[in-house]
Amino acid sequence: MKKGLTVGVVLLFIGISFVPSIAQTPEKQPIPTSSGKWWYVGGSGPGNYTDIQDAVDNASNGDTVYVYTGIYNRIENKTYCVDLNKSIHLVGEDKNTTILNGTCIWEVVDVEADNAEFNGFTVKNSKPGTGILIYNWSNGERKNIVIHDTILVNNSEGITIAECSNITCYDNIFITNGDGCYFFGSGDCSILHNLFLKNGIGLYSTYSGVTMISKNEFRENTNGIYCAGSNIRLTMRSNNFINNTIQASYDKQGMIWQLPLFIFYRQHWSRNYWSDWEKLTPRPIQGRLLLDTEIISRYITIPSFEFDRIPTQKPYQLNFKD
């Protein structure tokens, strides 16, 4: 597996004490819209928690934890800001001003429960780790997670989705991360209407499949999309690729006898906009085949091409919200 899945350093004291009860100030709190209880963090309501993890730990599956505007730093003696270990809704008041600051070590948010939702935050400063990690440490797939309306900035990886199914990411903004979204061994997922801006790689997918990547904008990244290993039935449809150093690329790796199978291990490109392609003809996406000969201790590299056969001539107006 790639980087970002290791844990463990002890940091300086950052946490604060808390008051373990639910706030009762309806004039200050948003009106609950879900069937479970609502728990509040920050703000001025009497009984509001000051630490997000305390509210999460006291919530039950189906509840909502609502976090007011503020900067929430890493928990004392922990490698994260939030361990999302319940099937709950974790909601920030405003994604621009409700900030989870990772202070530069490991993951900021560790999603350790199925059927969870996370939205309304800025997640930042997790290097060399990941902003939001979705992975099942006890084996098996992590599933049914929704991440939306979140800003991910200055992380080694904005979101890591590893060995998961039915993950949905939409209306997020990925800025100046090493990888915006790293996608490993996962399928039946949706990456919809996100902005990938000035990252190393916007979307990095390896050994994954059956995923729709649509209505996203990849702009000014070193590489917009990079697919490695064997990816099956990834569909890139109706995206904008604008002024990336490399708009998109791929590597397929395997044994030399697997060469005839590579026709099935391919991405599906359809109706994307490419800022460097004004022709009506199919737009080529260049990649490589890396073949193990089993005879000599090196790979044979063969140039390869896939095609967006119907590229659109104008960028989609995607209207990302600030």
Image: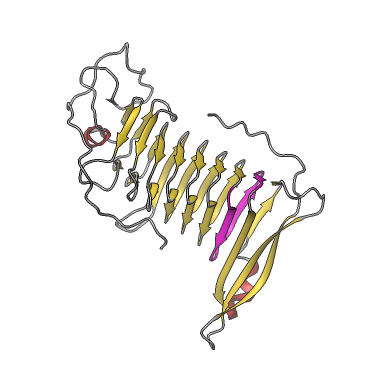
In the displayed orientation, state which residue is furthest to the bottom: 295
Image position of 46 with respect to 167: above or below: above
Q: Is residue 62 visible?
A: no
Image position of 163 with respect to 85: above or below: below
Report the colour scheme: secondary structure
The residue at the point 40 percent across, 48 percent down is: 143
Residue 224: x and y in percent read 60, 51
In screen coordinates, is 111 left or right of 250?
left
In the displayed orientation, state which residue is furthest to the right: 280
Image position of 75 with respect to 259: above or below: above
In screen coordinates, is 174 left or right of 136?
right
The residue at the point 35 percent across, 39 percent down is: 101
Number of labels in the image equals 0
Residue 35: x and y in percent read 34, 26
Q: Nearer the viewer, residue 11 or 216?
A: 11
Tell me the quarter of the picture where residue 7 sits: bottom left
Is most of the magenta stretch helix, strand or loop? strand
Residue 304: x and y in percent read 68, 68
The residue at the point 27 percent across, 17 percent down is: 44
In screen coordinates, is 145 left or right of 258?
left
In screen coordinates, is 256 left or right of 278?
left
Q: Does the stretch in magenta take in 173?
A: no
Q: Is residue 111 visible?
A: yes
Q: Does the stretch in magenta take in 224?
A: yes
In the displayed orientation, state which residue is furthest to the top: 27
Tell me the quarter of the picture where residue 97 sits: top left
Q: What's drawn in magenta, residue-wise?
A: 221-243
Residue 302: x and y in percent read 65, 74
Q: Nearer the viewer, residue 192 or 52?
A: 52
Image quadrant in which the N terminus is located: bottom left
